[in-house]
Image (cartoon, rainbow, N blue to C red):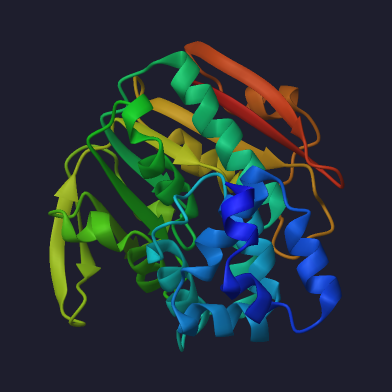
Amino acid sequence: MIGDLKNRDVLQKLANDPTVLEFILKLTDDELESFVTITNWSPTILVKLRDQPEHLRVLHKMWNIVPMTDETFLRNFFEIYDHPTANRSSVLDAFSQGQIDSKIWLINTLIRLDQDLGKIWIMCGWIGTLAYLLFRKRTYLQFDSIRSFDIDPACADLADILNRQEVKRDWMFKASTLDVLDLTYDDCMWYTKKSDGSMERDFGSADTVINTSCEHLVDFDRWYASIPRGKLVVLQCSSHDSHEGHVNNMDSIYELSSRAQMKRVLYKGTLDCGQYQRHMLIGKK
């Protein structure tokens, strides 16, 4: 493969500087395949990656998760980043290494547990990255649909953009603006915004309740108490106490498991994220 591509005129044209050509010629087969994938992207995306190098870090983290032969992810990501209500630093933070690693850890654990997740409700769903990653692994998971709730009114539009394909699929995914303390988990009704700006009623019951942002909940104990017994619950909490907005960080998995009592614990553990630890508890309440 390398021999064929090394002789192409396009590589000569790309290399205005001899050191660039030297770099290209040293690429391995896998690296060259990735390079060719990038050169096939539209000029609009390539220009954005050139002019806004912070996006390259997002691309690097998502490269082995999303099929990059399809530009859909990058187009949706840029639309979120440039959205008038988006906080750009927050959008980049949603794709930080710690955020992605902790969500992949959660998903891989659920795959091993092999549970029927049914209707998934994600609390404090932010811009929908966990839902997006769950859909990418759908062939290994059993679930029907995903609903995402966040109190920040800027989040729902961004989450719907990131998960646009599933929103169009009869609301396989839908994000709504709601305080999670106002939710009930059986026969609940709420209003959600459609793409044209109008509001429509949505309703349902949760089979699986996921909250990866327990450190952000001032009233964590009251929120957890509101979940009916028998629900499958997935919790993550950070030990990071210097982050603005972390009002309920927990120092250990033992603190999380003691505050979130479960009838049957399926998994508990801690992920080392470098500057902080993330604790995870999964089980039937």
Q: Residue 229 in the image: x percent, y percent?
A: 36, 22
Whether residue 103 sits left or right of residue 206 in the image: it is right
Whether residue 13 sits left or right of residue 241 in the image: it is left
Q: Residue 65 in the image: x percent, y percent?
A: 52, 45
| Quadrant (top left, top right, bottom left, bottom right) of the C terminus | top left
Which residue is located at x 60 percent, y 32 percent? 105
Whether residue 168 sits left or right of residue 50 in the image: it is left
In the image, residue 90 sits, relative to residue 171, either above or below, namely: below
Q: Residue 72 in the image: x percent, y percent?
A: 37, 64
Q: Nearer the viewer, residue 50 or 147?
A: 50
Q: Nearer the viewer, residue 215 or 219?
A: 215
In the image, residue 65 sits, relative to residue 267, either above or below, namely: below
In the image, residue 113 sits, relative to residue 172, either above or below, namely: above
Residue 87 appears in the figure: no
Q: Nearer the viewer, residue 131 or 77?
A: 77
Q: Nearer the viewer, residue 26 or 6?
A: 6
Which residue is located at x 65 percent, y 42 percent? 101
Residue 143 appears in the figure: yes
Q: Residue 98 in the image: x percent, y percent?
A: 71, 48
In the image, residue 18 sits, relative to residue 108, either above or below, namely: below
Which residue is located at x 63 percent, y 50 percent? 3
Whether residue 137 sits left or right of residue 49 in the image: it is left
In this figure, what is the number of numbered marks? Answer: 0
